[in-house]
Image: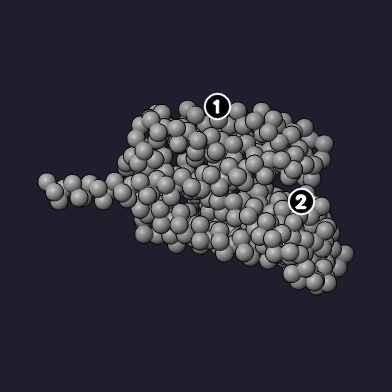
Amino acid sequence: MIRKEKIEYRQFAILVLLYTVGTSVIIAPSMLASYAGQDGWISALLGLGIGLLVVWCYASIGKFFMGRSLIEAINESFGNYLGFVIALIFTFFSLTLSSLVLSNIGNFVNTRMLVGTPLDAAEYIFVIVVIIGVRLGIETLARSTETLTPLFTFLFIVFIFAVLPQMHPNNIRPILEHDIHDIFKSSYGFISFPFGELVLFLMLTPFVSKNKKITKGYVLGAFIGGVIVMIITVLSILSLGGYGTAINTYPAFTIAKKIDVGGVIQRVEVIMAGIWTFSIFTKLSVCVYVTALSIKQLFRLRDLNCLTIPIAISLIPLSQWGTPNAADFQTYTAMWMMYFTYIIMIIPFLTTGVLYLKKKWGKKQESKA
């Protein structure tokens, strides 16, 4: 299938990077420290290594599809009926993930950035901007993220140096105090969130202008994004301790509020929250775009723009019904969503296996003929 829109591998890498940072930059430190405490950084390092291996497999699968999206490959592998069911499950996963991202945005804005703002108002504002971005297309979205990435990088570096006075090396000691099982338990969640969720980019690999560059963009973006999340985790543990990081819903925002450089640079958490919001907006835009593209290809529609408004509007009640607050997300949703993600992670590997066997069988039949 010929794609009208094209993005460079560099833009693809930036999309992967911001998607990886996304909601994980404000949630992952607490998640990693919940089981491993001050050893959460070890869980992050372990999860980063395994997660990059998963992403490398995704990239190899994307190149193997040869210009086909995951939905198109599923239909070709499993046929019209079974393929439709599997593709529908993947689409439902993308829609569910979109609603959870919007819920995270709404709760973060409502409880930290603009306290007291109605949840509906915060979510509607984001949804309107996302509709505009998705309707403009993936190429426009990729270019906009590329333009703002230098600002994101600069403020992130400033944030690191501003937090340095808060750090206390004793907060990370003793190392390996927790059982290895707890460390692995924390890394399970980090592998699925955010690396497992990068399966959505198998819908976008056909838009990359050079097929050979997919691996470089995929792995590089995931690596840099994962390192950023790991750095935030280490900073949170060094500043708040293992227990303080675990009980804080948004540890990174908490340490940003404490920044005080010479009594001059203070209250910079709004700036940092704005940068984090940009990465979260990118993740939500990608999720909504992939959902619309999946439905378009699933039902063989001509245009996906007719789907953006219904999908975006449906996310608001879905987000509030599934996770009405941040506590519910951490207690219930994060657990079953992790299992759901692992199930979805299997689909590309099964699809690739079936496609490979079909190609091999087809060659044998040709040779016999």
Looking at this view, is 199 or 164 the one in front? 199
Query: What is the CA distance from the residue labelled 1 to the residue labelled 2?
Result: 31 Å
Q: Secondary structure at mark 2?
A: loop
Left or right of 351 in this view: 199? right
Q: Mark 2 — residue?
A: 250
Q: Residue furthest left?
A: 369
Query: Amino acid type of disc 1?
Result: Pro
Q: Residue at x 77, y 45 (%)?
A: 113
Which residue is nearer to you in this view: 312 or 269? 312
Q: Residue at x 51, y 48 (%)?
A: 345
Which residue is painted at 82% across and 61% down in the image? 240
Mark 1 or 2 closer to N-term? 2
Label 1 secondary element: helix
Tag shown at residue 8: none
Q: Position of residue 194 (x, y in %)?
A: 60, 52
Q: Where residue 301 appears, x then y in whole percent?
A: 39, 28
Q: Is residue 278 visible?
A: no
Image quadrant holding the N terminus, namely top left
Q: Nearer the viewer, residue 224 or 139?
A: 224
Tags 1 and 2 in contact by the CB under 8 Å rule? Answer: no
What residue would you read off at disc 1? 310
- Foreground: disc 1 or disc 2: 2
With 330 as the anchor, is 49 left or right in this view? left
Using the image, determine if residue 206 lies above or below residue 185.
above
Label 2 crowd bin: few (<14), some (14–19), many (20+), radius 10 Å = many
Q: Position of residue 142 (x, y in %)?
A: 50, 49
